[in-house]
Image (cartoon, rainbow, N blue to C red):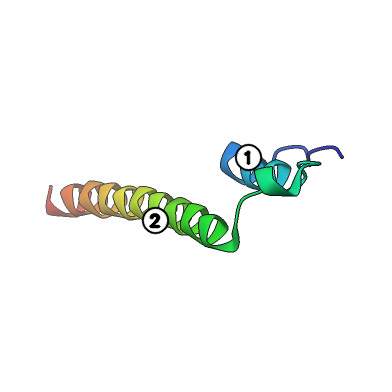
């Protein structure tokens, strides 16, 4: 199998782990859900920070 170009590393790590020839080495559904939740949480934090910076910059521009 080949990875899909430009796929974020977190997702590549998940789906390549699922391809392991040895089933016992593949992540469980619980592990997959935990990893996906972690990715979503990181993304939400990053997006919230970007939105806060944008709002702060726009507020400064309006108040000047």
Q: Quadrant of residue 8?
A: top right
CA neighbours of label 2 inside 10 A, class few (<14), some (14 to 19), many (20+):
few
Q: Look at the picture and state if 8 lies above or below 63.
A: above
Q: Residue at x 24, y 46 (%)?
A: 57
| Marker disc for residue 41 | 2
- Between marks 1 and 2, how big is the CA–CA gap? 17 Å
Of mark 1 and mark 2, the one earlier in the sequence is 1
In terms of depth relative to the viewer, which is nearer, 45 or 31? Answer: 31
Mark 1, secondary structure of its residue: helix
Across and down, in percent, residue 28 comes to 60, 57
In terms of depth relative to the viewer, which is nearer, 4 or 32? Answer: 32
Q: Look at the picture and state if 44 lies above or below 24.
A: below
| Marker disc for residue 13 | 1
Q: Quadrant of the N terminus?
A: top right
Mark 2, secondary structure of its residue: helix
Apparent side of residue 6 relative to residue 47 in the rendered image (left or right): right
């Amino acid at each position: 199998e080949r990875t899909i170009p430009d796929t974020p590393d977190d997702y590549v790590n998940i789906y390549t782990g699922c391809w392991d020839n040895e089933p016992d080495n593949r992540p469980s559904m619980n592990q997959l859900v935990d990893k996906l939740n972690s990715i979503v949480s990181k993304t939400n934090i990053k997006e919230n920070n970007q939105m806060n910076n944008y709002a702060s910059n726009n507020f400064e521009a309006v108040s000047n």
